Image (cartoon, rainbow, N blue to C red):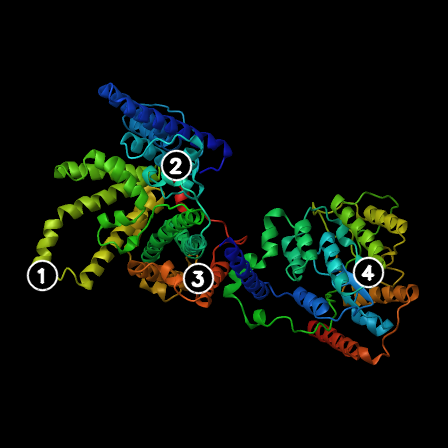
Amino acid sequence: MSWNPIYCIFIATSTLITYSSGLLIEKETKHKQYDEERSVRLKKFWVFLNLLSNLGILFLFKYYNFFGTTLVEIFSFLHINTHIPSFDYILPVGISFYTFQALSYTIDVYRNDVKAQKNLGKYALFVSFFPQLLAGPIGKSKNMLHQFDEKHSFDYDRVKNGLILMLWGVIQKTVIADRLGELVNTVYKNPSNYQGFEIAIATLFYAFEIYCDFSAYSDIAIGAGEVLGFRLPKNFERPYFSKSIKEFWRRWHITLGAWFKDYLYIPLGGNRCSKLRYYYNILVVFFVCGLWHGAAINFIIWGAIHSIYQITGDMLKPVKKTMIKKLNINTKGFGLKLFQVMVTFALVDFAWIFFKAGTFTIAITLIRKMFYFNPWIFIDGSIFKLGLDQKDFSISILCVGVVLVVNMMQRTRNLRSELSKQNIVFRWSVYLTTVVIILIFGIYGPRFNPQQFIYLQF
Amino acid sequence: MVRKAMVKGSVFLVLLMSIIAILNSIFILKTVHRDKLIEGLYNQPSDAYDVVLMGSSHMNGGLDPNVLWHQYGITSFNYATGGQPIDVTYYLLKEVLEKHKNPIVVMDLYYLGSTDEYGEEGYVRYVLDNMNFSMNKLVAIINCTPLKDRIDYLFPIFEYHDRWKELTAKDFNYGSNANYAKGFEAGIEKYGKDDSSNISTTKTIDLPPKTMEYLVKIIDLSKKDGFKLIFTNTPYDYNSPGESSSWVKEPIEMFNKVAEIAKENNIPFINYCDKMSDIGFDFKEDMNNAGHVNIWGAVKVTMDMGKFLKENYSLVDHRTDNKYAQWNSDYVRSQAASLSVENKSS
C-alpha cells in the first residue's frame, strides 16, 4: 500500500479513459438510428477497451505478481523451469475502490442508466471524491454523479448529523477496532504459541475488529460526505444480525455486493437459470470477490467458503423446511431467529480466519489448534496475556456489547434523529462524553503504533 | 444559519477545551517537577524571591535555597529540572519572570554543551507539561520540540491517555504539597573518585549553534528586562558526558568561550569546576556521581554563591522579618529531611 504522489497518474488515467469512453459510448447511442448494429458494436468495443485498460492497471499492481508466481509454481510442479519477471511496485492506495467506481460509470452509460458527464472536472470529482476514495463506499454513478451538479449550501442540522456519524466512526475505529486488534494481532502473528479458547477469542474479536474498522471508515466517509452535502450509499446494516449467509451479503459491504450483483452476478444470469448455472454464478462472483480483497490464496479460499455456504444453504433448503415442519418449530419465534443468527455468525467468523491469517498454512494451524479445551485460561489469568491486560480486556468486552446494543437499537429507530429530539443538555453531554471516551480510551498517540484502516490495503 | 453554527460551535469548543484542560491535569505524570512549578511558581505570590535558580540537574542539586536563606537571609527558588535543555530554560525563565519581576537570575550553563536540536522528550516534558497554557508555553513548544510531537505537547492527554489504568487519588488532587525544599534536590551518595578532567587550557571553541542562539537570547532578555544575570557551572567531571555523540567534546574550551562572552556582556560567570580548591570542595567526598554534587557539596557551592550574592548585590537580609517565619521552619524541615535520608542510608 502506498501514498506515493506519483500514483496520482493512475487515478488520472482511469478518470480520463472512463470519461472519454463515456462520451464515445453516448455518441454511439445518439447515432444508433443511422446504423444500429455498428453503433452497438462500437459501444461494446469502447466498454471492452475501457474494462481492459482499467482492469489492466489493477491487474498489474494487484495481481500480476500473484499470478506470475502461481504460474511458476504450476510449471515447476510439471518440472518445467520458467522465469516470470516480477513487478516491484507497491499497490496504490484506494485503487480497487476507485477503479470499480469508475467502471460502474462506463457500464451505466452503456446501459443508458446515466448520461455521460461532459464536465471533466465534475467527473474527476466523482471518481476521486475524497471521503470515499480510499476505502469506499463504492458509489454508483447513477446515484452519485448528479450530486456534483446540485447546489450545496450550508445546512446546520445536516452538518451536525454528519459530524455525529463521523464521531461514531472514530469511536468504532480508535476505541473498539484497534483495541480488539491488539489481542487479535498477538495471537494471529504467533499462532503456534496459542491454542483453544485463545484462538477462539482472537477469532471472535477479529469479527468485531474488522466490522468496526470498516464500518468506522464508511461512517466517517458517509459523515464527511453529509457535512459537504453529499449522500453516499450505506455500506453496512447490522451484518452480524443476519439469519443466513445470503442475508449477510446484503448487509456487509453493501456497495461492493451491489456492484458485483449489478455488474457481474446479474449479467452472468443471476438465479433465473438452471440450479447448476446458479451455483456456478455464485462460485464465480465469490471467487472474484475474494480476489478483489487481495491477490492471495487465503482471500480466494475465503470467497470460496462463502460461496459454498450459500450453495449448501440453497441445497439444504428442502431439508430445513422438512425439519421445521416435523419438529413443529415456530418460524416466527425468537429462539429460531437467535439460533439462525448465531449459526450465521459462527460461519462468517470461521471464514474470517482465512481472511485474517495471511497464509493458508497459518489458517490451517489456527483451525487445528483451536479445537483444544482450555477453559482455565479464563481463571488463571492467561487470557490477559494476549496483548490486552485485564482492564483493556474488560473494556473490549464492554465495547463489543455496546456495538451489539447500538446495532439492536438501529433496527427499530434512527439513533441520530432520536438524539436530535432530546434537549440540548442531554445532546451536548452525549457529544462531549463521546469525545472524552475517544480521548481517554482510544488507541492512538505516540505510545501506540498507528493502525491503518484494514480496508485501505484492498 | 451560519451564525448559529458559529456561535454554537464556539461554545462547544470552549466547553471541550475546558474538559481537555481538566483531563490534561489529571493525566499528566505527577513528578516532583510538577510540584515545583505549581507550588514554586503558580501558587506563589508575585515577586516572592530575591534570586531564581535556573538550569538542569546540575543546578537542581547544586544550589540549595534553604542554605541561602539560613546563611544569608536570601530568598530564592530552584526551578532547575533534570535534563533541561537551555532553550527550555530560556522559556521557563520567561515564565518565571512573568511572576517575579527583576529577581537575580543565577543560571547553570552545563547544557550549553548539548549538540542535539531538541532535548530528550521525557526531560523536556518535566517543564513543558507542567507549564500553564500561555504564549510562553506555545512558543516553547514550537521552538523546543520536534514538529511531529508538538500536538502531543500542546494536548498532553494525547501522550498520557493510556494512564487511565494507573490513575490514583493523587492524580486528581495534585498540587497541594508545600515545597519546603524550594525546588532543591540532591543525592547523598559519595562518588569516591577523583576528577578525571583535571587539565587546563586557554583555548576556546564555538558553542553548538542552537545553544549559542539561546545563550544570546538569555543575555538579550536580561538587558531588555533589566534583570541581573549570573552564569555558573557547578562542579562536575568534564568527562562525565562520556562518549555521548550529542555533547561537545571540548567542554573546557567551550566554557572558556562562555567566559569571554560573559565578560563582553558584563555578566559574572562563576565556574566552580575551576574553583573547587577555593571553596574546599573535595571531589571524592562532595560529588554524588561524576556529574552531580551531593548534599554536602551543594552546601559548599551554595555558601560560596551566597557570599558572592551578598557581597555584590544589595540584598536585604529577611531573617529578622516576621513575614518570613515560614522560611525558618522550611529550613528546619529541609535539614531534618536531609538528616533522615542520611541516617537511613548509613
Q: Which callout, 1 or 2, points to the residue nearer the camera?
A: 2
- SS of the residue under disc 1: loop
| Rendered view: A322 above or below A19 | below
Q: Where is residue A257 in the image (x, y as percent from the top left)?
A: 28, 43
**In this figure, which residue is indicated by the disc labeled 1?**
A327
> Badge 4: few (under 14), some or many (20 or more) residues near its Cα, within 10 Å?
many
Which residue type carries mark 1? Leu
**In this figure, which residue is indicated by the disc labeled 2?**
A98
Q: Quadrant of the C terminus of chain B?
A: bottom right
* Image mark 4: chain: B
Visible residue check, residue B52: yes
Which residue type carries mark 4? Val
Give the CA distance from mark 1 to mark 4.
Answer: 92 Å
- SS of the residue under disc 2: helix
Visible residue check, residue A79: no
**In this figure, which residue is indicated by the disc labeled 3?**
A392
Q: Do labels 1 and 4 share a chain?
A: no
